[in-house]
Amino acid sequence: MANPLISIRDLKVHFKRRRQLVQAVDGVSLDIHPGETVGLVGESGCGKTTLGRAILRLSEITSGSVFYRGQDLAHLSHSEMQKHRRHLQMIFQDPYASLDPRMTVAQILSEPLDTFSLYKSGERDGRIRELMETVGLSTRFVRRYPHEFSGGQQQRIGIARALAANPDFIVADEPISALDVSIQAQIMNLMERLRRERNLTYLFVSHDLRAIRHVSDRVAVMYLGKLVEVADAKAVYDNPLMPYTKALMSAVPVPNPRVEATRRRLVLEGDVPSPINPPNGCRFHTRCPWAVAECRQTVPELREIQPHHWAACIRISPEQPYIEQASSGSQ
Amino acid sequence: MSLLSVRNLRTHFDTDGGVVKAVDDVSFDLEPGKTLGIVGESGSGKSVTNLSIMRLIPSPPGRIVSGQVIFGEKDLLKLPTEEIRKVRGKRIGMIFQDPMSSLNPFMRISRQLMEVTELHMGHSSKQAREHAVNMLQLVGIPDAAARMDSYPHEFSGGMRQRVMIAMALSCRPELLIADEPTTALDVTIQAQILELIKKIKAEIQTSVILITHDLGVVAGMADTIIVMYAGKVFERASAMDLFDRPANPYTKGLLMSVPDPLRESTARGELYQIPGLPPDPANLPAGCPFAPRCDKAADICRREFPPMVQVAPSHESLCHFAKEVYGESTHLHS
């Protein structure tokens, strides 16, 4: 396999909130290869948005590394980082909030061109029109303001802005969550077409498990600041190994009444604990139906349980990958 | 006999841009003990339908222009305000997307729950308190007796939704209206809440109207589904029929545009997409409001409003070509 485009090593993002330490991202390692889409899923508060932002240095990194083309972004000064920014872009969840309401589409799209000194003034208009056409916006709207567009169109503007400086890696943070169902499909298709045409690499962050399955080559599942399972999308959905992933997958409502009528769900008890005082040992042990005493002490490492299928659970192993068959221990 | 029968309901809003016909000639029936799903995107009129049934439309700018909402023997739209208050919370319970919008942040949970049964069931404060503990236990609040004197902010989102369900069901209503009850929740918590609604529905034998944009959620919950678009009912069918054989191009497009994680063929590649944008409700196009986005649209669709066509017993579709669409869509899932 080719060298990864982005290589995250033992990344930690800790911050203080109300004088308490929040371990939002706590020791994450992940490789993202050129041209692939990695889906990052998890529930609210699991740290997925913070992880996405930290890769782009939009959240302050506490420790660890983010290698991009061999260079560790985590230790660059702000001015050195600025040189890389045109290659590393972000698409935000709330398209309206991420666009300056006082700027026209033309101004919004020329901002990155100014910042990175791209395209001479004579080429500007052409570039802006090209960007608008690329994302399916009529160039007639070039002088309009964000509020004159629908949510889906605003997200297209956000995507065009991210593309303006020809990036090769984009973190898309819940890019379709604020949109209606019929518009979600449009944006997913647009992003997939752009990835193919421009050889983009995505980290697609979402809590929407159906969307993640559709857009991703590989999926990383996050729980309370840690990755608990990483594998090909198909493997994560059809053959989840870590108990939290199993519960997550069985909770996804499927748009098929026949399946829903006969499905047996693994419904978890209780809520996600706070990242301020995460449980010791395996952070999932408080909700895990298979937890044993040792799960409260030992922090599970992400291990390759099956080829290219990594999971963090001390109760499974390459010899015994299925927790249902693990001998029941004493609680 | 139906528990609830909505006939030709029209609710309009006066806005600067003109009259918005948010709900325009909506009819449906709900049988006792059944769950009706109302599916639609934002602006389709699904929530306004619910608020109209409850007579909670802010006026101005909104007004119920015409129609009937027959619940039991009575037309709720004709009841005096005093009478409708007795129905709300007692015979019809409601839960909303955001529990904080229905819970008073300054009042203990216990007080809020007790108020309901003191008002509607004439409970003494002791009876009301006992009842409140029972309800909180029923919806799975651990350590209910101790926790009931907490304030809403002391509960998590999922727990608050449980408290709201407990409150909505306190008087054992004949009808529970749930408007996007799990939209703000995480998927594992959503699964808990949906299981809870199913369980309690069976236990207290209430009927449910479930309003949602999520086709997966209705697939698992509803007996009958109506699909709304631009204030109109576009299709009505049993859940099985609707998903197996949609008879309306909008429904069909919606079903095909949602990735199904269990279906191999949907992974990667092009997802079906409905082109264009939902119409501006103050400026609906002539003819069928979906025509500008419909790949089946013909001249007649842009000219004439479509008829409601019955394609099978208990299966209707608002489309000039309903029978054709129905004929073409055999078993999307097999």
Image (cartoon, rainbow, N blue to C red):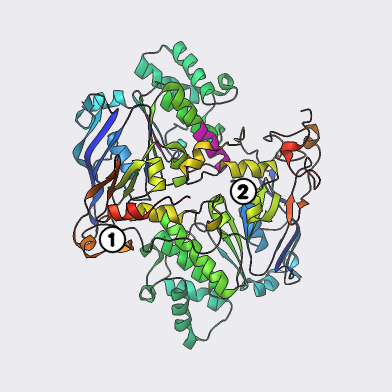
Which residue, given by chain and number where applicable, does mark 1 sit on? B291
Please name the amino acid that badge 2 sits on: Gly
* Residue at x-position 72% and y-position 40%: A283
Quarter where residue B241 is shown: top left
Q: Which residues are magenta?
A: B176-195
In the displayed structure, B317 sits above or below A5; it is above
Category of crowding for the residue at label 1, using alpha-carbon neighbours closer than 10 angstroms: few (below 14), some (14–19), many (at least 20): many
Indicate the chain on which mark 1 is placed. Answer: B
Left/right of residue A139 with respect to residue B200 in the rendered view? left
In the displayed structure, A213 sits above or below B162; it is below
User: Is any atom of residue B107 visible in this view?
Assistant: no
Quarter of the image where the N terminus of chain A is located: bottom right
Quarter where residue A71 is shown: bottom right
* Residue at x-position 44% and y-position 60%: B272
Res. A42 mark: 2
In the displayed structure, A242 sits above or below B124; it is below
Q: Position of residue A185 (x, y in %)?
A: 46, 59
Q: In what element is the residue under mark 1?
A: helix
Q: In what element is the residue under mark 2?
A: loop
Left/right of residue A13 with respect to residue B333 in the rendered view? right
Q: Position of residue B98 (x, y in %)?
A: 45, 39
Please name the amino acid that badge 1 sits on: Ala
* Residue at x-position 38% and y-position 48%: B245
Quarter where residue A52 is shown: bottom right
Quarter of the image where the C terminus of chain A is located: top right
